[in-house]
């Protein structure tokens, strides 16, 4: 029998340093998607890793350490989003310039991207988190459930609900 | 006709296959419009958030070796082995890595030395199992369960697709297992060739049945290789 271990769901690493080193890139990326701002994501990542440092001793030996790190990052990220919304000044309005360059010249397409981004920003935090975890962080529904709490069905429902809202934002005039 | 949003989303995310009812709905005007709308939604999401994280581009290192089953390519990221491939040209192997993993691809015998060494020993009959870390980020959680179950089948033995389904306790059964194994990103290292059809028949193999038989013979599982 071969001894193969998965880097993505490997057993508990020997040190927290190894764990955070391995996943720093994807966690920052995830927080940027959650918060919509890269600097805030870097800050939240720092904070999340500090929390992870304090909680590392309580991580069960057989736990999925990647999902554990995502759970801490999600809580930290959602807290940061909440603090920001209390600070009145929400710069949620998307300027056309903020759209990616490859959005192309089509005015219609730019409208569509703007509508989808607004809809993403209006999603309940857990739905936004579930959607990003599924679409961009390569987490399966079981791992999403381990990250957000709840069961696999709830994780899937959050992703599907989010996509239905985004689709609704395009309206009925889709050609 | 009722709408089938959940089923359509499941289809587009690869969670489930197309049901007859969904197929009929997708034949209607409304169904076609919704398929387009959801595709555009997912595409917009990718454009808006795909690179938003600015996760540093991954680098994947690869190498080719000559074996009794022809040229075998291996590729590894910093995290572990990502691909084993044969019956493919170097150019198409590299192009596929670039596209599927969105990675920079560099030829590096040094970075792949360990797995290359293990594979040579395997083909020389000096090694019957692998000790290697895998990077399976690009597989689904179901596929990972199937692959890890297949990894536990020792050399010299075979099990059926249904047996793997039973071991992972999945009701989707042998057909789903067969599909998951058919997309095994690291064949040989995860020995999907040791999974065969019920009743001792050889079953399928993405790399071709000749190679599947060769690998089983090499491992001494002759009965099933016949």
Image: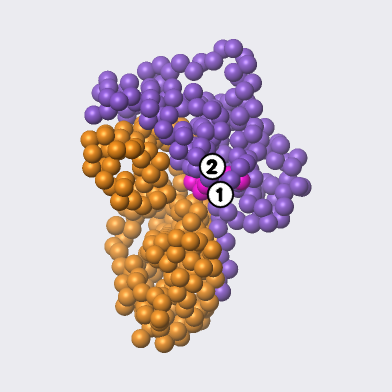
Hey, which residue is sitting farthest top in the picture?
A88
Q: Which residues are magenta?
A: A138-146
| Left or right, residue A74 beside residue B224 | right
Neighbours of disc 1 within 10 Å: few (<14), some (14-19), many (20+): some
Image quadrant occupied by the C terminus of chain B: bottom left
Q: Residue at x 31, y 47 (%)?
A: B21
Residue B54 in view (yes/no)? no
Say the numbered circle drawn on residue A155: 2
Q: Chain of mark 2?
A: A
Image height of A35 relative to B201, above or below: above
Quadrant of res B31: top left
Q: Nearer the viewer, residue A23 or A33?
A: A33
**Image mark count:** 2
- Circle 1 sits in a helix, a strand or a loop, which is it? helix
Secondary structure under tag 2 reads helix
x, y percent for residue A153: 53, 45
Q: What is the letter of the orange chain? A: B
The residue closer to the viewer here, B204 or B170, is B170
Residue on which the image places disc 1: A142
Q: Quadrant of the rendered structure where residue B48 is?
A: top left
Residue B32 % position (x, y): 25, 37
Chain ID for purple: A
Task: Indicate the chain on which mark 1 is placed.
Answer: A
Q: Residue at x 43, y 18 (%)?
A: A94
Q: Are marks 1 and 2 on the same chain?
A: yes
Taking the spot 64% from the left edge, 27% from the top edge, the residue there is: A79
Q: Is residue B121 above or below residue A38?
A: below
Q: Is residue B200 magenta?
A: no
- The quarter of the picture where the N terminus of chain B appears is top left
x, y percent for residue B75: 43, 59
């Amino acid at each position: 029998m071969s001894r193969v271990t998965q880097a993505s769901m490997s057993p508990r690493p020997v040190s927290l340093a190894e764990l955070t080193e391995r996943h720093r890139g994807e966690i920052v990326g995830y927080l940027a998607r959650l918060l919509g701002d890269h600097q805030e994501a870097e800050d939240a990542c720092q904070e999340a890793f500090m929390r992870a440092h304090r909680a590392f001793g309580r991580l069960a030996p057989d736990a999925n350490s990647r999902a554990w790190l995502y759970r801490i990052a999600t809580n930290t990220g959602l807290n940061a989003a909440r603090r920001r919304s209390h600070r009145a000044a929400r710069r949620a309005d998307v300027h056309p310039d903020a759209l990616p360059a490859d959005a192309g010249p089509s005015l219609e397409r730019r409208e569509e991207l703007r509508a989808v981004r607004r809809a993403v920003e209006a999603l309940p935090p857990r739905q936004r988190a579930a959607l990003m975890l599924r679409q961009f962080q390569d987490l399966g529904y079981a791992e999403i459930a381990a990250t957000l709490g709840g069961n696999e069905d709830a994780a899937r429902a959050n992703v599907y609900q989010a996509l239905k809202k985004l689709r609704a934002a395009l309206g009925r005039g889709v050609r | 006709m009722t709408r089938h949003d959940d089923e359509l989303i499941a289809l587009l995310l690869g969670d489930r296959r197309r049901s007859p009812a969904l197929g009929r709905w997708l034949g209607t005007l409304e169904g076609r419009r919704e398929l387009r709308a959801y595709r555009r939604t997912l595409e917009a999401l990718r454009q808006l958030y795909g690179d938003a994280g600015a996760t540093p581009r991954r680098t994947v290192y690869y190498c080719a070796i000559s074996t009794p089953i022809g040229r075998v390519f291996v590729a590894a990221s910093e995290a572990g082995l990502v691909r084993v491939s044969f019956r493919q040209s170097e150019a198409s192997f590299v192009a596929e890595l670039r596209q599927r993993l969105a990675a920079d691809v560099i030829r590096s015998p040094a970075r792949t030395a360990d797995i290359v060494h293990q594979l040579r020993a395997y083909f020389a009959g000096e090694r019957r199992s692998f000790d290697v870390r895998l990077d399976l980020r690009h597989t689904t959680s179901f596929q990972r369960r199937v692959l890890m179950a297949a990894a536990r089948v020792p050399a010299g033995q075979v099990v059926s697709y249904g047996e793997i389904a039973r071991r992972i306790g999945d009701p989707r059964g042998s057909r789903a297992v067969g599909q998951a194994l058919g997309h095994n990103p690291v064949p040989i290292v995860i020995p999907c060739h040791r999974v065969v059809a019920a009743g001792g028949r050889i079953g399928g193999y993405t790399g071709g049945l000749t190679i599947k038989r060769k690998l089983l013979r090499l491992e001494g599982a002759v009965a099933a290789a016949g």
